[in-house]
Amino acid sequence: MTVIGTPLKASSMAAVAGRIADSGANIDRIERMARYPVTAIDLHVSGADPEALRTVLAAEAARQGVDIAVQPANLLRRGMRLIVMDVDSTLIQGEVIEMLAAHAGCEEQVAEVTEAAMRGELDFEESLRTRVSLLAGVEESALDQVYDEIVLAPGARTMVRTLRRLGYRFAIVSGGFSQVTDRLAADLGIHFSRANELEIEDGRLTGRIVGDVVDRAGKAAALRQFAAEVGVSEASVIAIGDGANDLDMLNAAGLGIAYNAKPMVRDAADTAVNVPYLDAIMYLLGISREEVEAADAEAGIVTPAPPV
């Protein structure tokens, strides 16, 4: 199991160890995975049912304000070869449709619908078509402006760069728009991309989507398709997302990670990461910060010095 905190206090670790002991399990080995910008500790535990332990520790993690992931200690942990990510509020900060809405003067209205959809209160396809209709008349050039304004999640480039070196494949699956996500995939070196396509006529958005909507079921279908193309089982897929639209995708993967997610998504996922660093997910895969920095040094990439 992996424990992540900012900070990770001794009192929190003591509480976690107490819950492990209460479950009748033993801590066989302790390994530090990172000490900045988060603290991550691997605990190799034996003598307890993983599902029962996950349930007990989820409650303790909430009390302590830390993240705890429980996984089988097998070769699959470092053998997973496909990572499928949501884009808005996961790979990038913010929502592209809201950034486009700012150009149409309806950002607040679109944001309200987006929040309700991500909480699972609205049908995604209906909510998307409603929001996209408000973008009718926006100039196509706004897509370029929005792309230039995108801010990646902290650690996104590090995670993709490092795991690509280790043979991982990446896919992004988004309820957003291919005019943005395809460029993002090319920029980061992501192998597969699936998103909705905005209809454009005479240099302006029409307020309509071309073809079928990539919704909750569509994301899971894309995950299965990409896994088949890579030649790995669904058990060898890691899915990362934050909203209700990602639930089927998270459930289809061997490891579903709720990243700074809505409560209903955290409850349904295999594990949750609530620190604002996407590369913290590498610690769940058994890859330490020291290994990342060593690989970067070999490639001539300078990483920031740790705090003293």
Image (tube, grey):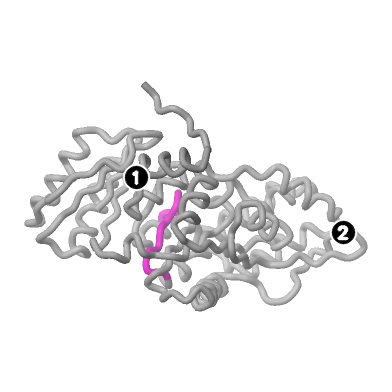
Q: Mark 1: which secondary structure?
A: loop
Disc 1 crowd rating (10 Å Cα; few below 14, some 14-19, many 20+) is many
Cα separation between marks 2 and 1: 47 Å
Q: Amino acid at mark 2?
A: Arg
253 up-or-down from 182: above or below: below
Label at residue 124: none
| Residue 261 is covered by the magenta coloring | yes
| Residue at horizontal 23 percent and vertical 59 percent from the top | 55
For the residues labelled 2 and 1, say whether their Cβ atoms are less than 8 Å apart.
Answer: no
Q: Amino acid at mark 1?
A: Ser
Residue 190 or 263: which is nearer the viewer?
190
| Residue at horizontal 37 percent and vertical 37 percent from the top | 38
Return the x and y of residue 286 as percentages of the image width and height. Answer: 32, 52
Q: Is residue 104 visible?
A: no
Image-based side of 87 in relation to 34, left or right: right
Return the x and y of residue 63 as percentages of the image width and height. Answer: 26, 43
Q: Which residues are magenta?
A: 253-263
**Circle 2 residue:** 204
11 up-or-down from 136: above or below: above
Q: Mark 2: which secondary structure?
A: strand
| Residue at horizontal 51 percent and vertical 71 percent from the top | 223
**Circle 1 residue:** 288
Residue 164 or 59: which is nearer the viewer?
164
